């Protein structure tokens, strides 16, 4: 039995006009760190709210540790930890008071499970008498994680824990998740940052309420259906415009300091790139074959099929 | 007026004993895309508020579009555009009403608003949505419209505060196409972001740590200097020293 199962879950808003979650199915295995990767409006929060029993789905079924989200909502509420995307602790209670409060309503004590949060709590302990509302973003995030963990949940739901947080705090947060995984807690985490996908055991790529792919990050990268090339030149915007208009090019988009491109004739890449270099003769031109990232896969999946129409292109 | 869009000399903002912005000195050239990065709490927002004419510095000098940040705040406001992820458009006005409203605020004539408004709507492919409420548009469209509105009065400089937060990777890139076009038209772009791949699209990047400007250079030179291949790592090396985050 998986830690989390969703079968054909549908959720709409505005009398069915907005399809937030569109026939979504996936499982999270025991002890797995599972990532739900997609932009704002993809349906991530609706899925979290359905699984934590605070929102009812219209169709389909879902269960946590084999317990149905509708029938067994009381069991689930006692057993899972949930960190919503919006900071939801009591701003006017101190750090220590918030933690004590959450321990008490889950009928436990801070001492009983202190070993689970010790690493994280030690970092905010110097501020234990500060009101939660006066903490910085990174510290708020750590306190919220402590409060979600204090009753030793069997499954941890983390809805965009790193959104708007800087690179340093993001890195620290993922290190904490890796340590929690070793304690055999199953974790479902969502993020709009594609570079965080590779830190998960498995991921689901989601866009406009539709799951586009569920697999390990490596398998998703391996199944990229074409050769991917990176190119750059001194005037990279000019290069982008030239390449986009060129018949030989299937797709071309900016990616950091390079452009990423695929070619219509996928078998003769090196020769075609040489032709392109000769044709436009850009200053400081460089091109090479590269391994795709999750973001490349996401873009490819978005650009194919009906999703393209729905995303308003 | 010189060809600098922004000049800053030891610009400082102090709240009591706390130096939110601590003697930052830098210039931004006209038509440049300038990335303004920093960890949470590094002082980016405070610095941007001073440059937008919304808050007085404690000490130091700065000019924006040639105007003094102490004495000519209103002239600065008329010369710049501003857009942030959090606030940009009125959700309960239509696409066209938002355009009319911002055009009016910046003192454009009605025929001019009409002409440019039609141009914006058709360029963005929103002709069929022009009479829809902005609140009904997908986030990606809203962000692109918000940017077009921010540069509707053809400001010398546009300030973008995390304009692409939460936006899907395809729309994020379409958004950067708009930024490039604006820069090619001579508009100076001053942008903050948490996406390090976007930092690479800037001509130059600055990184603030604890109120000070700890680095300022082209992406290529910064990577060379910090002996790494990724901007992510440059940022990490600089920001992990922060004591305020």
Image (tube, coloured by chain):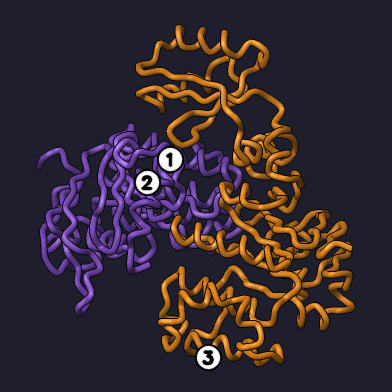
Chain colours: A orange, B purple
> Which of the image's four quarters has the N terminus of chain A?
bottom right
In front of the other: B68 or B202: B202
- Mark 1, residues whose alpha carbon is within 10 Å: few (<14), some, or many (≥20)? many
Mark yes or no: residue A313 visible.
no
Please tell me in which quadrant of the rendered image residue A27 appears.
bottom right
Asked if the residue at tag 2 contacts the one at tag 1, i.e. Cβ–Cβ closer than 8 Å, the answer is: yes
What residue did someone put label 2 on?
B234
Whole-percent x, y for residue A18 in the image: 72, 58
SS label for mark 3: helix
Whole-percent x, y for residue B33 in the image: 32, 40
> Measuring 19% from the left and 51% from the top, which residue is drawn there?
B64
> Measuring 57% from the left and 40% from the top, which residue is drawn there?
B170
Q: Same chain, marks 3 and 2? A: no
SS label for mark 2: helix
In front of the other: B20 or A302: B20
Q: Is residue A27 above or below residue B144?
A: below
Q: Is residue B71 above or below residue A252?
A: below
Q: Is residue B133 above or below residue A195?
A: below
Please tell me in which quadrant of the rendered image residue B203 appears.
top left
Please tell me in which quadrant of the rendered image residue A33 appears.
bottom right
Q: Same chain, marks 1 and 3? A: no
Q: Chain of mark 2?
A: B
Label disc, if present, on residue B230 of the rendered structure: 1
> Measuring 64% from the left and 56% from the top, which residue is drawn there?
A41
- Mark 3, residues whose alpha carbon is within 10 Å: few (<14), some, or many (≥20)? some
What residue did someone put label 3 on?
A97
In this picture, residue B236 sits left or right of residue A201: left
Q: Chain of mark 3?
A: A
Q: Same chain, marks 1 and 2? A: yes
In this picture, residue A132 sits left or right of residue A210: left
């Amino acid at each position: 039995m998986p830690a989390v199962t969703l079968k054909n879950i549908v959720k709409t808003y505005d009398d069915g006009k907005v399809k937030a979650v569109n026939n979504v199915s996936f499982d999270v295995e025991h002890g797995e760190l599972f990532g739900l990767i997609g932009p704002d409006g993809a349906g991530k929060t609706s899925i979290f709210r359905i699984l934590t029993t605070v929102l009812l789905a219209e169709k389909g079924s879902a269960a946590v540790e084999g317990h149905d989200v509708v029938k067994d909502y009381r069991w689930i509420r006692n057993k899972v930890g949930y960190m919503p995307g919006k900071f939801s602790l009591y701003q006017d209670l101190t750090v220590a008071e918030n933690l004590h409060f959450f321990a008490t309503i889950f009928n436990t004590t801070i001492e009983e499970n202190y070993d689970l949060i010790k690493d994280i709590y030690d970092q905010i302990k110097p501020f234990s008498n500060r009101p939660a509302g006066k903490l910085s973003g990174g510290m708020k995030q750590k306190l919220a994680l402590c409060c979600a963990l204090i009753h030793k949940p069997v499954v941890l739901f983390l809805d965009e824990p790193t959104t708007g947080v800087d690179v340093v705090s993001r890195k620290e947060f993922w290190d904490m998740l890796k340590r929690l995984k070793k304690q055999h807690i199953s974790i479902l985490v969502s993020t709009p940052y594609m570079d965080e996908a590779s830190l998960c055991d498995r991921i689901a790529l989601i866009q406009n309420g539709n799951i586009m792919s569920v697999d390990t990050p490596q398998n998703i990268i391996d199944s990229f259906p074409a050769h991917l090339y990176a190119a750059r030149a001194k005037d990279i915007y000019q290069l982008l415009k030239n390449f986009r208009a060129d018949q030989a090019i299937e797709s071309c988009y900016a990616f950091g300091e390079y452009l990423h491109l695929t070619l219509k004739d996928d078998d003769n890449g090196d020769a075609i790139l040489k032709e392109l270099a000769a044709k436009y003769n850009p200053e400081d031109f460089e091109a090479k074959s590269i391994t795709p990232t999750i973001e490349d896969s996401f873009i490819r999946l978005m650009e194919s099929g009906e999703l393209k129409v729905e995303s308003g292109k | 007026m010189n060809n600098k869009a922004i000049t800053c000399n030891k610009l400082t903002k102090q709240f009591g004993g706390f130096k939110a912005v601590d003697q930052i000195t830098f210039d931004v050239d006209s038509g440049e895309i300038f990335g303004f990065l920093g960890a949470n709490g590094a002082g980016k927002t405070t610095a941007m508020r001073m440059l937008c004419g919304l808050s007085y510095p404690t000490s130091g000098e700065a000019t924006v579009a040639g105007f003094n940040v102490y004495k000519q705040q209103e002239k600065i406001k008329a010369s710049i555009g501003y857009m942030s992820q959090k606030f940009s458009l009125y959700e309960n006005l239509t696409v066209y009403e938002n355009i009319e409203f911002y055009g009016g605020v910046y003192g454009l004539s009605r025929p001019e608003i009409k002409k440019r408004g039609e141009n914006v709507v058709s360029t963005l492919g929103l002709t069929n949505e022009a009479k829809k409420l902005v609140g009904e548009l997908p986030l990606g469209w809203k962000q692109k419209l918000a940017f077009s509105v921010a540069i509707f009065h053809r400001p010398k400089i546009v300030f973008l505060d995390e304009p692409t937060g939460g936006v899907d990777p395809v729309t994020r890139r379409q958004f950067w196409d708009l930024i490039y076009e604006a820069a090619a038209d001579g508009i100076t772009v001053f942008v903050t972001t948490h996406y390090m791949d976007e930092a690479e699209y800037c001509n130059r990047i600055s990184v603030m740590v604890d109120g000070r400007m700890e680095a300022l250079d082209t992406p290529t030179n910064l990577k060379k200097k910090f002996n790494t291949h990724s901007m992510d790592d440059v940022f990490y090396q600089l920001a992990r020293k922060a004591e305020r985050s």
